[in-house]
Image: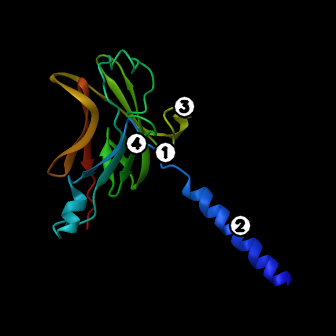
Amino acid sequence: MIQMKKIGFFLAFACISLIAVGQQKPTELDKSPMDMSYWPDNYPLLKMSGKAKDQPIARIIYGRPVKNGRTIFGGIIKYNELWRLGANEATELEIFTPVKIANKIIPKGRYTLFCVPSENRWTIIVSKDNFCWGSFTYDTRKDVVRADVKPETTDEIVETFTIYFNENAGKANLVMLWDNQRAELPMTLVTTKK
């Protein structure tokens, strides 16, 4: 009899739990969806088709905010203030093969990117401080390297913040585009001597 009560209690609890879970709503699509870019470009497709010779060199994961008629640089992105280089979580850079940025070798690992933009210079920061929401907990002691790059004003307006690797023979520029601004962070593949 006690065994039947336990089974009955368990079944009732399981049914209530299933009903509660069934009523949970999925999260809505974020206004700034996440995107990803690889060096080499389209690495997952290359791998799937058997054309990828090696592992990727790097991957970037970032939130893509939208201009929506707003003033971006000097407006919602304040000059000379730290920016997460995207939206929501701080932009993540994963290095699969060592690269050189601003004459510093960056070993294989996962990093976070930040930026301090000004009108004539962007300081790109590679940090070991991972899994950050925005730049609220940024810690300079976790900086790996800082690199200054010169932004260019473009004729074309880019509505949605975009990052991609523009590669060329063992080198790549991490291209950052938004509004009428374009900045490029040079990266070089570190080759090991055999």
The answer to whether mark 3 and mark 1 are in CB contact below 8 A is no
Kindly indicate the quadrant of the structure image that contains residue 176. top left
Mark found first going from the N terminus, 4 or 2: 2
Kindly indicate the quadrant of the structure image that contains residue 91. top left
Visible residue check, residue 107: yes
Count neighbours of disc 3 (C-alpha within 10 A) and say few if under 14, some if 14 to 19, many if 20 or more. Answer: few
Cα separation between marks 1 and 2:
45 Å
Query: Which residue is found at the position 34% from the left and 36% from the top?
Result: 64
- Under mark 3, the amino acid is Phe
Cα separation between marks 1 and 4:
29 Å
Q: Nearer the viewer, mark 3 or mark 2?
A: 2
Mark found first going from the N terminus, 3 or 1: 1
Q: Is residue 49 left or right of residue 163?
A: left
Cα separation between marks 3 and 4:
23 Å
Q: Nearer the viewer, residue 13 or 32?
A: 13
- Under mark 2, the amino acid is Phe
Residue holding disc 1: 128
Cα separation between marks 3 and 1:
15 Å
Cα separation between marks 4 and 2:
32 Å
Mark found first going from the N terminus, 3 or 4: 4
Residue holding disc 4: 29
Count neighbours of disc 4 (C-alpha within 10 A) and say few if under 14, some if 14 to 19, many if 20 or more. Answer: few
Q: Nearer the viewer, mark 1 or mark 2?
A: 2
Which numbered disc covers residue 13? 2
Indicate the quadrant containing the C terminus: top left, top right, bottom left or bottom right: bottom left
The answer to whether mark 1 and mark 2 are in CB contact below 8 A is no
